[in-house]
Amino acid sequence: MSTSPIDATTTAAWRALSEHRDAFRGDLRGWFAADPQRAERLTRTAGDLHVDLSKNLLTDETLELLVRLADEVGLRGRVDAMFAGEHINTTEDRAVLHTALRRPAGAEPALVVDGQDVDADVQEVLAQVAEFAEKVRTGEWRGVTGAPVKTVVNIGIGGSDLGPVMAYEALKPYVGDIEVRFVSNIDPTDVAETTAGLDPTTTLFIVASKTFTTLETLTNARLAREWLWETLTAAGAIDGSEASRADAVAHHFVAVSTALDKVEAFGIDPANAFGFWDWVGGRYSVDSAIGLALAIAIGPDAFGELLEGFHTMDEHFRTTPFEQNVPALMGLLNVWYVNFLDAHSHAVLPYAQHLHRFAAYLQQLTMESNGKSVRWDGSPVTSQTGEIFWGEPGTNGQHAFYQLIHQGTRLVPADFIAVATPAHPLRDGEADVHELFLSNFFAQTKALAFGKTADEVRTEGTPEAIVPARVFSGNRPTTSIMAPALTPAVLGQLVALYEHITFVQGIVWGINSFDQWGVELGKKLAMEIAPAISGDDEALAAQDASTKGLIEYYRAHR
Ligand code: F6P
C-alpha cells in the first residue's frame, strides 16, 4: 500500500470526539429510561448474529462521530483495497487475502491478484483437503500396518494451532469418530503427554507451519517422528531400517505449509502436503489448509459450512454502510474506549463452554495484529493502539475476575456471547440448565450497565458502614452477541467478525495489522542463549548479569 496512513488524530472527527468526550457522562440508566427504543435502535444483525450495542457507553452523537471518523480515515477505501488484494501488508509487501479463502466456488468476477487466479488456487487446495479428510474419515487412508486412523495429532503453534484448537473445541458436537489432539509448546511435556497412550499404528501427525521454520513446531515434529519410529519398532510394526522408517513417515505424517520444499526436506512426501499462500497471515489461517485437522474431525461438509459463515460476515463487512456494519461499529467502539475513555483491555466472555478457547485465539488475532508502535509507513503511531484482550467463559469468570469489572477502578469493555440452543439441553429437575446459564449472561450485562445505587443498597437493610462496598456504579459497557446455535456457519461468522474488528482498529491507528516483527527478537536471542545453557562458558559470559544468574541457577539445579 503506497498510500500513507491518514493520521486519525488530525481529523475533524477526532477533534469532535475529543470535545464530545470532555462533556461525556455515561448514563445508561438515564438513557434507557428516556428512550424505550434504545435497545432496538442500537441492535444490529450480521448474518445469524444478533448484536446488541445498546449497553455501550455511547449516544447517537458518539456513533455519528465514530462513523465520521471511519470516513475521514478512509476506512471504505482500505476495506476495498484488502478485498482486492492490494499489498496492504507493507513491511512484507504482501496482499492480505484471508477473505479469498472463503469465497464460494465460481464467485464472479474471479479474483486475480499479482497475475494469479486466487480463486482457482483456493478451490484446488480446498478440494485436496476435502478429499484427504474423506479418505481419513472413511478409513481409506491407512497406516503402515494397514490400520485406519483413529487419532490425529496436529503439531503447530500460534496461528497453526490456536485457530484449529479453538474451532475443534467449539464444534465438538460435529466431531466424528476421529479424535484430534494438539501439540504446540516446545516444553517436552507437551509432546510426551499428548502422545501418551496413543497407538502409533492408528495415529496420523499433521505438521502445520506456514513457514516450516518455526523452532517449536519442527522440534516437536522431530520428537513425534522419533516416537513413531520407536513405538512402531517396539510393536514389531516396522523393522527399524531406514526404508521402513521412511515408509512409516509416508503413512503417518502429512504437512500443511506455504514452504513445500522444506516439507520435503523434512521427509514428508510432497504428495501429502497441503499448501497455502503468503497472503494468508498465520492468525488468519484457520480457514486455509491449516484447518486440515478440523476438516478431518468435522468432515468437509461442515468445514464448507464454516467457510460459508466466514463469507457471510465478509460480505456484510464489505457491503454494509458503517452505521449498520457490525465489525465496523464494534471496531470503532473499541477505538472510542481505548483512545477517548482510556480503556486498556477488552474482555471477551462467551457463555458457551464450547468457546472456551475463543479468548486465547482472539489474543493472537488482536494483539499480534494491533500491538504496534509504528504505522504502515514506518512513522510513529499518534495514539494508543492495541488493547489487551482476555477472557474466560461465563459463568467461570464470574467467580474469578468479574469483581474487578463490576467495581474496579478500570474501564473494561466486554463482549458477551451466547447461543439460544445449547448442544446439550439438560434439565436439573424442573430447571432448564441452559436457561439458568443464560440468566447469568443477562444478569451480568444488566448489573454492569445499571449498577446499584447506595439508596438501593440501603433499602435492603444493609448496615451503613458497608453500603459503599456494596454499591455498583454501573455504566460498565458491554456488547451482547447472540446466535441461534453454535453451528459451523455461526462460528465462521464470529471469527470473521473479530478479524474485521481488528482490521478496522488497525486502519484508524494507521498500522499494518498483518506483520508480527515483535516476535522476532526473542526467537533470535533464544538461539543465542541455548549454548550458554548447555555449558558453553563463553556464551554464558556474553550474557547480561540477570540472564547469566538465571542460567547459572539452572546449571546448578539441573
Ligand atoms: O512467532 C509468531 C508466528 O510467526 C505467528 O505469527 C505464527 O502464527 C506462528 O509464529 C507460527 O508460525 P508458522 O505457522 O510459520 O510455524
Image (cartoon, rainbow, N blue to C red):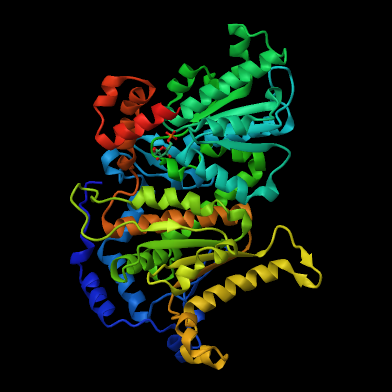
- Residue 206 x %, y %: 57, 30
Quarter-of-image position of residue 425:
bottom right
Pick the front one: 396 or 426: 396
Quarter-of-image position of residue 350:
bottom right
Classify the position of the C terminus by image quarter: top left
Residue 258 visible to the viewer: no
**398 displayed left or right of 158:** right
Pick the front one: 102 or 266: 266
- Residue 284 x %, y %: 45, 45
Residue at 27% across, 43% down: 90
Residue at 44% across, 29% down: 557
Above-or-below relation of 125 to 284: above
Residue at 66% across, 19% down: 231
Quarter-of-image position of residue 113:
top left
Pick the front one: 526 or 54: 526
Q: Residue furthest right?
A: 429
Above-or-below relation of 211 to 493: above
**14 displayed left or right of 38:** left
- Residue 266 x %, y %: 48, 19
How many numbered marks does the figure carry?
0
Above-or-below relation of 345 to 203: below
Pick the front one: 408 or 176: 408
Residue at 33% across, 65% down: 338
**30 displayed left or right of 458:** left
